[in-house]
Amino acid sequence: MNPLEVFQKEAPEVAKAFDGLITALKETSGLDAKTKQLVYIGIKAAMGDTTAIYYHVSMAKKLGATRDEIKDTILITLSVVGLKGVASCLPVALEVYDKTV
């Protein structure tokens, strides 16, 4: 089961509040949607969060992100947190990117 589905089922009021936060963040105007996804991917790669990478790379591609942009977003985390995020997230990201239509 999708982790967000579990969250929504087990804590519906908290999930609803979280959804409101996400909506508010999407509506800010300082960054375009694609750039927001790239920032999110970089943060999640730095954390080694392959599940988030799996979902957000597809979103970023649909918003116009290129394969090189995805790759560079993950590679830049090397200077901050080392190899762990790149080693765990880059293969997932590129696989998802290549499969996303």
Image (cartoon, helix red, strand yellow):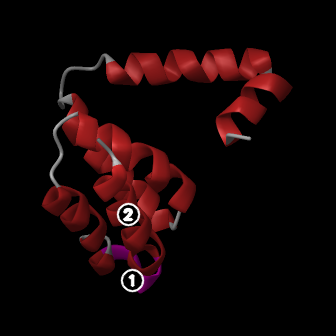
Q: Which corner quadrant of the image does residue 80 belong to?
A: bottom left
**Residue 94 to residue 29: above or below:** below
Which of pointers 1 and 2 indicates the residue nearer the eye?
Answer: 2
Q: Residues within 10 Å of mark 1 (few under 14, many from 20)?
A: few
Which residue type carries mark 1?
Gly
The image position of residue 13, as x and y in percent, is: 76, 15
Q: Main secondary structure of the magenta part?
A: helix
Q: Is residue 55 above or below residue 63?
A: below
Residue 95 is inside the magenta segment:
no
Quarter assignment of residue 96: bottom left
> What residue occupies the far bottom of the structure in this picture?
83
Label 2: which secondary element: helix
Coordinates of residue 49 in the picture (x, y in percent) = 54, 60
Looking at the picture, how far across and down is residue 17, in whole percent? 63, 17
* Residue closest to the eye, 53 or 15: 53
Q: Which residue is mark 2?
A: 95
Q: Earlier in the sequence, mark 1 or mark 2?
A: 1
Where's the C terminus, which quadrant?
Answer: top left
Q: Is residue 24 left or right of residue 11?
A: left
Looking at the rendered image, the quarter that the N terminus falls into is: top right
Is residue 83 shown in magenta?
A: yes
In the rendered structure, which amino acid carries the disc numbered 2?
Answer: Glu
Q: Which mark is residue 82?
A: 1
Q: Residue at x 31, y 79 (%)?
A: 78
Q: Residue at x 29, y 57 (%)?
A: 98
Identified at 36% across, 44% down, the residue is 58
Magenta-colored span: 80-84
Q: Above or below — where is 36 with respect to 98?
A: above
